[in-house]
Image (cartoon, grey):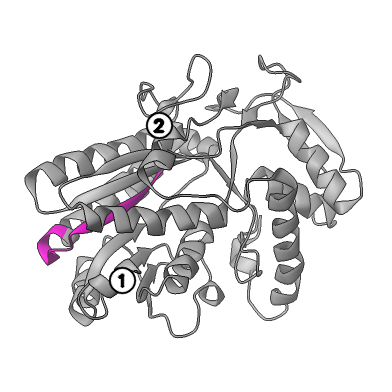
Amino acid sequence: MNIATRLPAKPCVLVTGGAGYIGSHAVLALLDAGWPVAVIDNLSTGFRFAVPEGVPLYVGDIEDTTLLERIFAEHEVAAIMHFAGSIVVPESVADPLKYYHNNTAKSRSLLDAAVKAGVPHFIFSSTAATYGMPEAGAVSEETPQVPINPYGWSKLMTEQMLVDTAAAHRINFCALRYFNVAGADPQARTGQSTAGATHLIKVALEAALGKRDHVGVFGTDYETTDGTGVRDYIHVSDLAQAHVLALEALIDKPERSLRMNCGYGRGFSVLEVLDAVDRVTKQKIERRMEPRRPGDPGMLISDPSLIRATLDWQPQYDDLDTIVTHALAWERKLAQLREKVDFNRFAA
């Protein structure tokens, strides 16, 4: 039986950043599972068109407590899925205070509002960047969390706030530590839309479609098979499904909170990813070798044992070429959307 049928009538999930990349996929996954949804997004990197018709969209900031009080009053909010924040590692090194404000201070405001409103469940978009630069092997939840950049620290601080808040109040949480999120909705309903995005697969596809003249490969002297950085790429729709399952787990056991890795447990180097893009697009992308970027570890691969043991999570798109194929379909659809939507404020 769908867990939504066991809840009070029409409970709502508030999705912060629901007009953005991962948040918009979570909205679709929730709707597909029968959950009513509301979205709050300041549209700094999100888009109105990414929010499905019929879903309430509140344009505003998560530190606007008056707006949050209004949302809680207008909807029976059973849970919050929190995606709003800044995500670019090099930018966090250059402008750390922006990240401690957007990712940490604003999360504190949101969490405070949730506690005051009596929202019982909170799902947080965390990151593998909280682990920093692990010594070797796959990263488990027991791996020490020692971030090497402000982005990772800003997320780890929020995790700690959640731990302390759950100990003091009637709220439980799940922090999902993402590895490298990629791909797009298989039905091309949404995808990564922000111009100037730094996600490797999106950058490579933009190059393949003539929007960029090359792809920079940052770091060729890592201790990896081909010298380039290795990451665990997870399809965004599989990640979104993990959020729905995490919500069900929190409701089933309200006394329990969870912190889990979300990846496939297998890594691909930058050059292997570019090879996959070449295969799918049937053309060769120009690659330019560049120095390492500040704050980038050489290898980051998940051990997904805990999430697989805790949730009935069965990824459907664990294949690099499939991830690239879905991302390519979205890029082509995005080209059509650009004729209708003003993208100028997101220019690289």
Percent coordinates x, y for residue 24 in the rendering: 50, 65
**Which numbered marker is on residue 130?**
2
Q: In front here: 306 or 15?
A: 306
Q: How many marks?
A: 2
User: Among all residues in the image, which is located at the extreme right?
Assistant: 283
Q: Quadrant of residue 170?
A: bottom left
**Label 2 CA crowd tier, 10 Å (few <14, some 14–19, many 20+):** many
Percent coordinates x, y for residue 93 in the rendering: 48, 33
How far apart in space, not on screen, are marks 1 and 2 (Cα)? 32 Å
Callout 2, which amino acid? Thr
Q: In front here: 121 or 97?
A: 121
Look at the image and tell me whether residue 228 can be seen.
yes
The residue pinned by badge 1 equals 4
Percent coordinates x, y for residue 13 in the rendering: 31, 68
Residue 179 is one of the magenta-drawn residues: no
Left or right, residue 154 beside residue 293: left
* Residue located 44% across and 52% down the image: 242
Q: Quadrant of residue 200?
A: top right
Q: Give the magenta-colored segment's residue range.
A: 115-126
Looking at the image, residue 203 lies above or below residue 251: above
User: Among all residues in the image, which is located at the extreme front?
Assistant: 1
